Amino acid sequence: MMFFLKNFQLPATFNLPKSQLQMYGEGLYCAGEDLLGRCARGKDSLERLTSVVAWSISTTRPPIFGFAPYNPVLGETHHVSAGSGGLNVLLEQVSHRPPVSALHATNAAGDVRLVWCQSPVPKFHGASIEAAVRGRRELRLPRHGERYEVDCPNLLIRLLPTPSVEWSGDVRVVCAESGLEAQLSYCRSRSFLGFGGDARCVRGRVFRSASRDETIYEIDGFWDRTVSLKDVSTGEVSVLYDAQRAIGKLTTPVVQDHKGLAPSESAVVWGEVSDALLKKDWEKARQAKRRVEDEARKLAKERNEKGEVWTPKHFSLSQNKNGEWECWPLEESVPPAPIVVPS
């Protein structure tokens, strides 16, 4: 889960050779272990909730300061399959202004279904920029009849005194069916006299919603290293999340079926730009990027002149009374993709 300033058109030399849609998808399908499938394999509701917390932490990937992916064009899609569990992931850029991305993921066993809608909203604070990631994340475990609502941390871009990118803010993981809840805080760790500290600290707890003062587990650690889980009643400490195992050695997705690629696929839309960037042909990358953006503006102008309203191909899109975007897939499951992550 990454955020970059979508309202600014960066020169191609500052672009990563991939789309923001691909970055969102990588938070799911690029993983060294099947954390999402583990949520469904938990022996009881408490183990499943802590597994959801671990998966949520895994989507917090280290950002890269100074470089940004491409802003997805309206209608752009990204479709990838990964893992022995047969995880199929489909994303679509369902709105351009404001930018809204939708994700739908299901596995082959049918015991995991994730719907993830997000729209970053930047706030400027002088020496920093904080991006609140709005939108709904809902994970369903059909075999257990459970539905989990999961928040996102905010992305904090510090410009002064030293440029850096950090995750910050509070995250809730709630399961109404089991009555269990987790609260996490992404924050800077304490240090001597309050100076320094580690910006990649995460702390929290697990409790029952009906008795919020009674903590079941305490959560403590660093989201880019390890996060521990402490049983309050017994004092036993275990590893909840290990970043080295989860995201330490990732495999690059490959196109397995070129004919199956949709024209809207990120790899197709931005293919020429990415190829030029990887070859460090900056002028060719600049021109190719301009062509993609000009074509998107041309199509938008034609729709406006005809009075047409663009509608997503794979999702329905709405905004609730709180201003949050909600995206719902039009199909029950995601089919296997032409792009795969090798096992």
Image: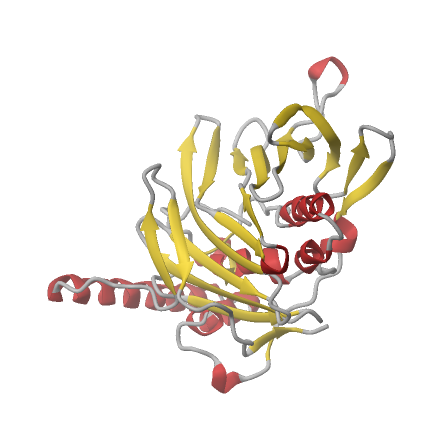
Q: How many marks?
A: 0
Tell me residue 94's x, y (percent): 36, 59
Q: Nearer the viewer, residue 341 or 125?
A: 341
Name the image colouring. Answer: secondary structure
Q: Residue furthest bottom?
A: 259
At x 56%, y 53%, the residue is 139
Residue 307, quarter of picture: bottom left
Q: Quadrant of the C terminus?
A: bottom right
Tell me residue 156's x, y (percent): 53, 35
Residue 226, quarter of picture: top right
Locate residue 128 relative to residue 215 in the image: left or right: left
Q: Nearer the viewer, residue 86 or 76?
A: 86
Tell me residue 70's x, y (percent): 45, 58
Q: Residue furthest top?
A: 193
Locate residue 33 relative to residue 79 in the image: left or right: right
At x 49%, y 71%, the residue is 267
Is residue 282 visible in the rendered structure shown here? Answer: yes
Q: Nearer the viewer, residue 55 or 160?
A: 55
Is residue 71 visible in the rendered structure shown here? Answer: no
Tell me residue 81's x, y (percent): 59, 71
Residue 135, quarter of picture: top left
At x 42%, y 55%, the residue is 101
